[in-house]
Amino acid sequence: MIYRWKMAALNTRRGVELERRARTWAHRRFGLGPDVGNYARLPEYIREHAPGHSFVDVGCMWGVNGLYAFLAEEAGATSVKGVDVFGPTPEFEEEHRARGSSVQFILGDAGAPETIREVGPTDVVFCAGVLYHHPSPFDLLVALRLMCRGKLILRTSTVPEVPFARNMAVYWPFLSDRQRRLWSHHRLGVGGQIGITSPFEPEAGYGNWFWGLTPSAVSALLETAGFRPVYRATEPWAQTFICEAVHPPIEHDLPDHDRARQLGAEVSAGGEARPQ
């Protein structure tokens, strides 16, 4: 019940402002909690990390028309690519011509092997507003790790932490109307959230909102995918992480047939395999 009240309060402009002020005060006065974030700070992070490095924006079109890719180029990135499942938009192409830009647009699904190959190893990977639109956020983070040889700048929608429980998440498709209303941001001025303000639409694909991840769940997914978060900026309904690529993502090494038979024999002999 307390969690429901907290969500209701944070789904108002007044509640968001009070939360932001309280966190800012605690962070500045006592150094408590992560930095306080804001969507408007994304250019700041790009200007800090892009100069002298290759850069890719994964999810570069929706609502921004390649803006962050152009900012990275302007900041001094050595090469810039942008990836999205639709586009390039007319706004992107017009800005590309006006700037005489060298930004390369790649039409592709970030998780597809051919897209990962086309992006190639990249120093700085930027991804904002994508993770919660993907039905398998871990697979997306693994794809970003396969592209990344340096830093990841990730901004994503999140939900408030659940008291006394870490790494929690809610899967929005096929919730009841009543349950979906708990997560709607319409009072904050957010437009339609497919899967939340309206039922899940299979034909909308990645346009659906799939996952409400808590900040701790995002952090755990990042570490499992091979990233180490080194900075976090928090907002009531979003987080920005800056991460270092530190180790390969977890994966299962499929054995060849001979090794598979040997493993099967070892498991059976050891009595390890029992129904759970």
Image (tube, grey):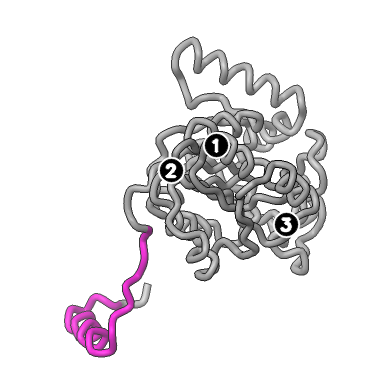
**Amino acid identity at mark 3:** Pro
In magenta, the rendered stretch is 249-273
On residue 88, which mark appears? Answer: 3
- The quarter of the image holding the N terminus is top right
Q: Are marks 2 and 3 in contact (CB under 8 Å)?
A: no
**What separation in Å lies between label 1 and label 2 (alpha carbons)?**
13 Å
Counting from the top left corner in percent of width and height, residue 240 is at 55, 37
Q: CA distance from mark 1 to mark 3?
A: 26 Å
- SS class, disc 2: strand
Nearest to viewer (mark 2 / mark 3): 3
Q: Nearer the viewer, residue 95 or 62?
A: 95
On the image, which quarter does residue 39 sit in?
top right
Residue hosting label 1: 240
Q: Earlier in the sequence, mark 1 or mark 3?
A: 3
Q: Is residue 38 positioned above or below 130 on the image?
A: above
Please tell me which residue lies in front, 200 or 63.
63
Residue type indicated by callout 1: Thr
Judging by the rendered image, the residue that carries numbered circle 2 is 151
Q: Tell me the residue at 61%/41% (across/down).
A: 159
Would you say 204 lies left or right of 7 here? right
